[in-house]
Image: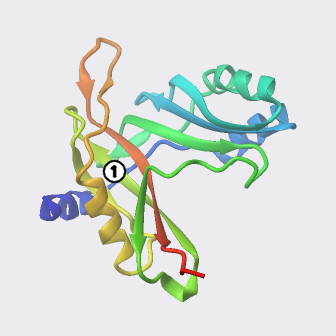
Amino acid sequence: MSALLLAAAAAGFAPPSFAPDQLRQLERETATASVILDAQVDPKGRISHCKAIATSGDAQQGASLCSRAESLRIEPAAVLGRSAYGVVRQLVGAAGAARSPSDIEVQVNVLPAGQASLRVQANVLVGATGKPQACNAGDAPAGYGDVACAQVGAITFGTLKDGEGQPVQYVRTVSVDFVTQPSAG
């Protein structure tokens, strides 16, 4: 499967994303909260099924953020240069106040440059059945992207359905945290 993942990764795909001005608008509206949004995005950039998966600060502002986000149109996912379905996970608010949980944690003996942890963001093309079809972690340090994508290849994701209820292919980002085992005191 890794050959399939690597070959398809070269073809090009990207998850949906908010424009910087859209994030600034949402951040102004949530001045006293930090929220991690998780939502589906259709090929026209419409957000649906939004939920706040982590909130810090004013819980009421965090809870209302999804309804405001659903009124926006964001950059949809892309597969081979065409708009596609996707899942977006986005921090809105003060950086570091709420941290998005990782999807996968991998324990390793050593990390680059003596880091205590390393987060790799892997873009994943998920088939209509929920099985990964391709993975790309191009910004990861040498070797870590390959390990992250190998871990992603073992996951079956939930299906995403179009407006007619049919399962569709989609693009999402998966967070893979690499951590070292704490040394015994």
Residue at 75% x, 35% y: name it.
26
Q: Is residue 65 visible?
A: yes
Q: Is residue 39 above or below residue 88?
A: above
Farthest bottom residue in view: 113
Q: Residues within 10 Å of mark 1 (few under 14, many from 20)?
A: many
Q: Nearer the viewer, residue 160 or 118?
A: 118
Residue 147 placement: quadrant: bottom left
Give the image location of residue 33, x and y in percent: 80, 37
Q: Is residue 18 visible?
A: no
From the viewer's perspective, is 120 left or right of 115?
Answer: left
From the viewer's perspective, is 4 left or right of 54?
Answer: left
Give the image location of residue 173, x and y in percent: 43, 49
Q: Nearer the viewer, residue 181 or 106?
A: 181
Give the image location of residue 97, x and y in percent: 76, 50
Farthest right residue in view: 32
What is the tally of numbered marks visible in this picture? 1
Circle 1: element type: strand
Q: Nearer the viewer, residue 157 or 161?
A: 157
Q: Is residue 158 above or below residue 99?
A: above
Residue 58 placement: quadrant: top right
Identified by mark 1, the residue type is Val
Q: Is residue 19 above or below residue 67?
A: below
Farthest top residue in view: 164
Residue at 50% x, 39% y: name it.
88
Q: Is residue 27 above or below residue 94?
A: above
Quadrant of the frame with the N terminus: bottom left
From the viewer's perspective, is 78 left or right of 71?
Answer: left
Q: On the image, numbered disc 1 is attached to which residue?
A: 124
Coloured how?
rainbow
Give the image location of residue 116, x and y in percent: 58, 76
Residue at 60% x, 82% y: name it.
185
Q: Nearer the viewer, residue 12 or 103?
A: 103
